[in-house]
Amino acid sequence: MLVPEINSFYPNSGIKGTNVSIIGNNFIPQVPTEEGPGPYVNTSIVKFNGVIAKAGQIYQDSINMQRINTIVPEGVTSGPITVTAMGTTSSSIEDFIVIEPNYLSNVTVSTASDYGGIDVDRDAEGNLYVANNDHKEIVKITPDGTKTIFWSGDVTSQQTLLGIAVDKHGNVFATIEDSIRKISPDGAFTILAGTTKGYLDASVNTAQFSDIRGIVVDSSCNIYICDSGNYVVRKISWDGTVVTLAGGLFGNPDGPG
């Protein structure tokens, strides 16, 4: 008599509604190899710790290996997975761990798109900064949901605000066309680097950039930017030195920087 076998399942944990694949054998009678991998009609019963789950069709992945795709049901707790087929039930050796989401109460969620958001970053205190290119402004959202205009520019300007990053001191760096702007926590606005379109590695006072896009800041306050107009990735060190790290040619070849 054929007895169902559960060899493994993945993932081994998840919330209710997670898709889980069960790997084993004899979920249905062995399917001849010439009939292909399936799918085949599932006549077995799948349970998560005693709660019946919705199970899909069965696949014959190889000889002596079958697969059932199923979904973690509502009302289930952590425990073994069982498959009942042809009158016999088999249980997994390991338990499936049900994860209970930790939802925050009384929180209003807003998306960056509400503000024409094109980039977002967070400071050490959990405040979000959203780059709003539509209105040429940076919106600050505190953990309690309060929204304020952290910085605003000329809405009639054709210059594009494309990226922002926040360092450990709360300084916000924004990429606007060919320059990097710095907004300190008190709102003071300065041009950190880039006043002339071009390509030049030098100090921040004379370095040139072209169509800057992404920007990030590391824990040592070094800044990394995507200089898309020059097809390079560049670094602005904490001491103000600008160097090219990688790129320089249009295309996507792999290799040394």
Image (cartoon, rainbow, N blue to C red):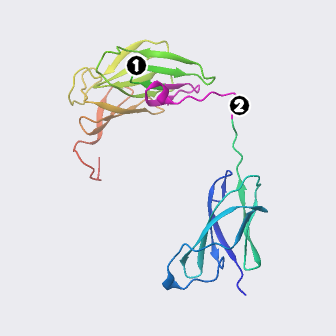
Choose the circle earlier in sequence order: 2 or 1: 2
Where residue 79 sits in the image (x, y, percent)?
77, 60
Examine the rendered structure and indicate whether residue 35 appears above or below residue 112: below
Residue 252: x, y in percent? 27, 50
Is residue 124 shown above or below 44?
above
- Tell me if 254 is positioned left or right of 46 in this view: left
Q: Which residue occupies 57% across, 83% down?
A: 31
Q: CA separation, marks 2 and 1?
A: 31 Å
Q: Which mark is residue 161?
A: none
Foreground residue among 175 and 243: 175
Quickly name the residue at label 1: 135
Name which residue lies at 70% across and 40% down.
102
- Is there any visible trace of residue 170 in the rendered image? no
Residue at the location (49% across, 12% down)? 186
Residue highlighted by disc 2: 105
- From where the camera sits, is residue 131 visible? yes
Q: Amino acid at mark 2?
A: Ser
From the viewer's perspective, is residue 156 above or below residue 229?
A: above
Residue 135 percent location from the top left of the image: 40, 19
Residue neighbourhood size for the residue with mark 2, other residues' Cα within 10 Å, grouped as few (<14), some (14–19), many (≥20): few
- Which region is colored magenta? 104-129
- Using the rendered view, name the quadrant where residue 72 is placed: bottom right
Secondary structure under tag 2 reads loop
